[in-house]
Structure formats: structure tokens, C-alpha cells
Amino acid sequence: MIKRIFVLLIVFEVFTACNEDKQEETINPKTVSFDTDQNSSLMFQDNEPIAVMTSEARTYSIAQIIRVKAVDAKNIEVSNFAPCDIENATILATIEGKQVQLFKIKKIRAHATQTMKYPFVDGTNLFLDTDNKKVDLSQYKTTGIDPTKISFDFTGDSEILLKLKKLKALKWTIHYYDYDPNNDPNNNWEPLKAKDIRRFSGLMLNMGIVFVSDQFKQAFLNEEIIGNDGKTALTMAEKEQVYNDILIHPRFDCGKCTNVSGLGGGSTLGYAEHILHDYIKIDAGDITAHEIGHCVGFNHDSNMTYPKTINNVSTGISPVMSRINTQFFNGVLFIATIQNYYKPADFQ
Ligand SMILES: [Zn+2]
């Protein structure tokens, strides 16, 4: 009798072990690609109306460069706001405080956008949470999910995804804006074109990855920064505050200026053709940082805009930006590069 129970136990254990293996195997996140004209369309193309490209619907957070947006209870829109392809990303969804791996993207091409059904509406019941534990979302299959009850994020460990994840320290909302729709010759703006937006999208990524870097932070905090009175040096605490103000700047309305290299203040941010053309190949940090200095509240008496010569050294945010930009070029640390940018003709 004892022997028989023992045998049954072994059989039972083998059976449950097999069952567990089987469950692990069946939970494969849905994998999608947005890499052809058949499975996605492209934003910011030359034939797209400027009103669409500058609409609020095209506003994105630099922290969420792969933007997933609930269209309604059953559909989402997936968009890539980077001017380069991104591969092997995992889209995460947080539903009532629980985060699940919603689906995987094998490849999303530069500036691609596509609407799709939620995988749990479209036949998948079981998902994995971030600890690879099973989560059943079949309760949402027929009802879908209230768009206000779900939020999205992305993850992945490719080189570009690791860089994009660093941008989560930034609070920048990015919106493209045409400051000169009538091509008025009496202002310092010019009409915004698709090509300007495509290049600007790379410029913001490259500027962002420098600002969040330890190299920039340390160099900036070590720099002598003069305030708006033109003479008083900021304390370390004040410099930390200014650095933080750059990271948490809420919004940039990006446009194209002319006659001057850049225009900035509050949410207004403009760069001229030569900056949009050059930034990907050579350092344009003196201009790009100057305008960010204006955006966070500094005037021309401060070296948060134009540099000041202190002890025979050019000092201020612009020289810091130029020095770190040079390190980023030498180390191939930028996000958008001439190699991965999807329309090389934009820089010819
Ligand atoms: Zn200025």
C-alpha cells in the first residue's frame, strides 16, 4: 500500500511539472512590425498638410519617442517620433496599477505610425508582467479598456533603446509650429516644411541625450555661470536648479527662423536652416544651448546665452554644450546620426 502511494506521487509530480512547462511555452507576446507601406504609414512626409504635422495630435513627449496612444477602448495608435528605425522594443501597459508586456515590436521604421487592435481584444488572453509572471486579460476581450485606465511605456536593451530610455529624465513635450504661414518677409521666421520637422526631431533627441548625460551635468555644475544681472555668479544650488529647469522644461513649440541662427524663450524654440542642416555632422552647441538658456529664463547679460570670457576662458552654457557635443561626436553617443537617419537627402 505504501509503495503504491509513492508511485502515484511521482506520477502526479511529473504531470504537474509538464503542465507548468506547457504554460510557460504558450505565453509568447504578440510580435508586430511597422516596417513597410503595407503595415504602417509615415508622418512628416513632403506631401502631408502642414496643419496635420503641426496639430496637437502630433505632439509627443521626448520621453516616449515610441508613442502608444489609446484611440478608443479597443484600438491603439503606435508611432515612432524618431527619424531612425527602432528594433526589438517591448511595449508595456499599466492597467489598474499592474504592468504587463503588451506586445513586442520587431521593427518600427522612422516616423512610422499605425493603428492596431489591443492584443487582448484580438485573441490573446495571457500576458506576462515585468517579472515574467502570467496575467490574464481576458476580462477586457469584449469590453476593451477605458482609455483613461491604461498608460504605456516602452523598453528594450538595444543600443538605441538604451539611449532613448535615458531621455525619460526629460519632461519635454515637443510640438512643431509654423510661425510664418504667410511667408511674411518682415519677421525672423520662415514657413515650416516637412523636411525641417524631420531634421528637428533628430536635433531634439541629440540635444536631449547631451543634457541628461553625466558628462554635461558635471561640466555645467563646474562652470562659472553668471546670472541676469551680468555679474553675480550662481551658487551650486542655483546651478542645480537651472540644470533641473532644463530637464523639466514642459514644452517646446519648434519652428524655423531666418536672419538669425536661433530664437528662444518660454516654449518658443526656433533654429535656422544652417543649424538644422549642420547639427548632425558638426557641433552647433553654441546656438542650440543659447536658445535653451533663453527658454529657461536667461537674458543676454547672463552667460546662459552668450559666453563670457572669465580668466581668459570662454565660459557659459554654450562652451559647455560645445565641449560635450565634441565628446558625443567622437564617441558616437548621439541618437540620430548621419548613418541611421532615414532620409540622407535631408542633409545634402
Ligand atoms: Zn539670444
Image (cartoon, rainbow, N blue to C red):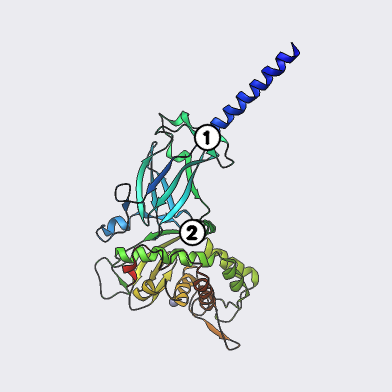
Q: Decide if residue 186 is in sight here.
A: yes
- Which one is in front, 202 or 125? 125
Percent of width and height locating residue 314: 54, 84
For badge 1, the amino acid type reads Glu
Image check: 335 left or right of 2? Answer: left
* Residue 160 tag number: 2
Image vertical order of residue 262 relative to residue 108, above or below: below
Which is more foreground, mark 2 or mark 1?
A: 1
Quarter holding the C terminus is bottom left
Quarter holding the N terminus is top right
- Which one is in front, 312 or 164? 164
Q: Is mark 2 in CB contact (under 8 Å) with mark 1?
A: no
For badge 2, the amino acid type reads Ile
- Which one is in front, 235 or 122? 122
Instruction: Assess disc 2: are there few (<14), some (14-19) or many (≥20) residues with their C-alpha within 10 Å of its C-alpha.
Output: some
**Given the current orientation, which residue lies at the most extreme bottom position?**
312
Image vertical order of residue 122 relative to residue 238, above or below: above
Instruction: Assess disc 1: are there few (<14), some (14-19) or many (≥20) residues with their C-alpha within 10 Å of its C-alpha.
Output: few
Q: Which of marks 2 and 1 is nearer the N terminus?
A: 1
Q: Decide if residue 96 is in sight here.
A: no
- Which one is in front, 293 or 83? 83
**Given the current orientation, which residue lies at the most extreme right position?**
2
* Residue 172 tag number: none
The quarter holding residue 21 reads top right
Q: Name the residue under label 1.
A: 25
Percent of width and height locating residue 335: 47, 63
Query: Which type of secondary structure does the marked residue at label 2 adopt?
Result: helix
Image check: 46 left or right of 130? Answer: left
Image check: 251 left or right of 21? Answer: left
Q: How many labels does the image show?
A: 2
Q: Is mark 2 within 8 Å of ligand 1?
A: no
